[in-house]
């Protein structure tokens, strides 16, 4: 098989196996509390995600979720279809476990991606007994099934990455913003997270949009469009930044734009235009590949990812004091200023929130929304206190037994990413929400995943490691994280 065809063939293979119920899946069994994290007010089963580029056109989000991540990022999608760069446009360096790609954001267009996601929601609604029409779709998106409207799975979130078309002039910021807003209008209903890509190295001029003025303008437009999404829980917004735009001015400018625009978080890392030093001897054939244009991804990016994560964490946290968010206004898309409605599952959080009370609120809401015909599973069990969707009625279930919504994590857990603001005196109830960081770039094992979490990220995303490691990669990383944590506890007790 030619290299340029491998990605497409792999996607079709996963999709075909899914259609027959024979897809690969994480066989690790029920996930316990040890890897749970809180992200955007949701308790996720683990802190591992997949990066955009694996599923560019929303063809296989469900099969990817069943490989074990809590975050699946699809895309990037552009407003109108575009072919991307000419082939060949992806090159492997097996000795480095690395890739060079210059896809150029090939996309079937935001409307096509939205159509696929809409079909996924409607099939889910039908299997849940809601019907298959527009009203049934709306009920699922408004939370009546007790799961996020994007992932359609408990303890998981779906991110959709968006970008501008290659022919949109870089210096016409209003036109660029209109591209991003068009994508939001198309996919926001079916997304839990929208990722604004301003960091692809293969679209000329795109990384120039990371300057603070244009970035603030674009992100403000995206945030405003997302608030108009016609569903109860609006998608949160993240911006994906380049590892090459790493000067103090560039990093600070991005953080300023995030706070000024009201964006919810940052994805630190993308492919790099640079060419890192080889890991060991480089075969002559691969030495020639290094001269190919495109973005490099591989294990050598890890140290840079950790460094940038620490820097963004520090500067974003400083922004909590220097540039606090304005008080929320009363609107359907804003968090309530009084006690939350116990019949609604919350999709927002503040640093001072009590997790045990929120878990009770979420459970109460799920009990009310789910149908009484067997959809409540082991609700009284202390080991499984929340709701899960049973395999027979959930079309997106892997069929494995024992999967359940995770309970809330302990605030003292060392991979728990609940915002801690003790270093910011005076911050308490009503303070601005801490910005969330996802980290991607060179993460290949559980020890590295823990390291980026300790540097300040909430989620560690993988891409190239999955390409080389195969469908068991995420399960392996999670097992390695558990082993590392167990070893650390034993060492602490000795």
Image (spheres, rainbow, N blue to C red):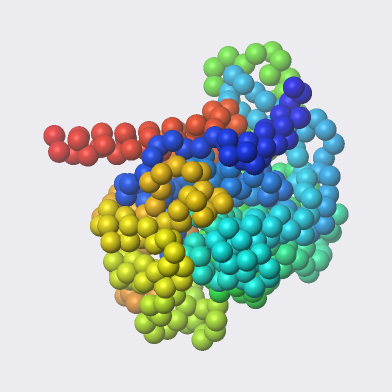
Task: Give the answer, above or below, for where 3 lies relative to 102.
Answer: above
Residue at 54% across / 84% down in the picture? 331
Task: Give the answer, above or below, for where 392 lies relative to 189.
Answer: above
Is any part of residue 92 visible from this angle? yes
For the residue pair 24 and 418, the one nearer the viewer reads as 24
Quarter holding the C terminus?
top left
Coordinates of residue 385 in the picture (x, y in percent): 31, 59
Name the side, left or right, on which 152 lies relative to 108. left
Name the side, left or right, on which 84 lies relative to 302. right
Name the side, left or right, on which 338 lies relative to 261. left
Is any part of residue 165 visible from this angle? no
Quarter holding the N terminus?
top right
What is the total number of numbered labels drawn onto the structure image?
0
Residue at 20% across / 34% down in the picture? 491
| Image-quadrant location for residue 135 | bottom right
| Image-quadrant location for residue 467 | top right
Coordinates of residue 388 in the picture (x, y in percent): 42, 56
For the residue pair 2 and 299, the one nearer the viewer reads as 2
Name the side, left or right, on which 254 lies relative to 328. right
The residue at the far front in this view is 373
Coordinates of residue 355 in the picture (x, y in percent): 32, 66
For the residue pair 221 and 337, the one nearer the viewer reads as 337
Residue at 83% across / 49% down in the picture? 82
Residue at 52% across / 78% down in the picture? 334
């Amino acid at each position: 098989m030619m290299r340029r065809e491998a990605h497409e063939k792999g996607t079709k293979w996963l999709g075909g196996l899914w259609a027959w119920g024979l897809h690969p899946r994480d066989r690790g069994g029920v996930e316990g509390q040890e890897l749970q994290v809180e992200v955007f007010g949701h308790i996720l089963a683990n802190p591992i995600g997949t990066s955009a580029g694996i599923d560019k056109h929303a063809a296989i989000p469900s099969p990817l979720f069943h490989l074990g991540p809590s975050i699946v990022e699809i895309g990037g999608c552009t407003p109108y279809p575009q072919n991307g760069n000419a082939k060949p446009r992806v090159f492997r360096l097996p000795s480095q476990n690395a890739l060079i790609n210059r896809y150029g954001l090939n996309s079937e267009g935001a409307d096509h991606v939205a159509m696929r996601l809409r079909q996924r929601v409607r099939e889910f609604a039908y299997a849940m007994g809601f019907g298959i029409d527009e009203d049934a779709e709306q009920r699922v998106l408004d939370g009546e099934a007790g799961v996020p409207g994007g992932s359609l799975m408990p303890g998981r979130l779906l991110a959709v990455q968006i970008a501008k078309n290659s022919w949109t002039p870089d210096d016409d910021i209003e036109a660029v913003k209109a591209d991003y807003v068009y994508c939001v209008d198309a996919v926001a209903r079916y997304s839990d997270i929208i990722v604004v890509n301003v960091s692809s190295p293969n679209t000329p001029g795109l990384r120039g949009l990371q300057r603070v003025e244009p970035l603030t303008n674009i992100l403000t437009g995206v945030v405003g469009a997302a608030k108009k999404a016609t569903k109860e829980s609006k998608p949160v917004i993240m911006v994906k930044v380049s590892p090459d735009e790493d000067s103090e001015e560039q990093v600070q400018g991005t953080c300023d734009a995030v706070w000024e625009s009201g964006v919810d978080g940052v994805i630190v890392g993308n492919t790099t235009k640079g060419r890192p030093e080889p890991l060991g001897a480089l075969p002559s054939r691969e030495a020639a590949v290094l001269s190919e244009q495109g973005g490099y991804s591989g294990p050598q990016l890890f140290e840079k990812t950790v460094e940038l994560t620490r820097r963004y964490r520090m500067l974003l946290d400083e922004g909590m004091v220097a540039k606090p968010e304005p008080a929320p206004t009363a609107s359907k898309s804003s968090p309530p200023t009084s006690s939350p409605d116990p019949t609604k599952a919350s999709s927002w959080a503040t640093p001072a929130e009590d997790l045990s009370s929120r878990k009770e609120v979420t459970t109460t809401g799920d009990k009310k929304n789910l149908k009484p015909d067997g959809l409540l599973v082991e609700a009284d069990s202390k080991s499984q206190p929340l709701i899960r969707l049973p395999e027979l009625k959930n079309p997106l279930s892997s069929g494995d037994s024992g999967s359940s919504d995770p309970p809330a994590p302990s605030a003292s857990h060392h991979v728990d990413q609940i915002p801690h603001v003790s270093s910011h005196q005076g911050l308490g109830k009503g303070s601005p929400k801490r910005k969330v960081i996802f980290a991607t770039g060179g993460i290949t094992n559980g020890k590295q995943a823990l390291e980026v979490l300790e540097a300040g990220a909430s989620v560690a995303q993988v891409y190239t490691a999955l390409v080389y490691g195969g469908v068991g990669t995420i399960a392996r990383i999670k097992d390695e994280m558990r082993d590392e944590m167990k070893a650390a506890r034993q060492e602490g007790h000795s």
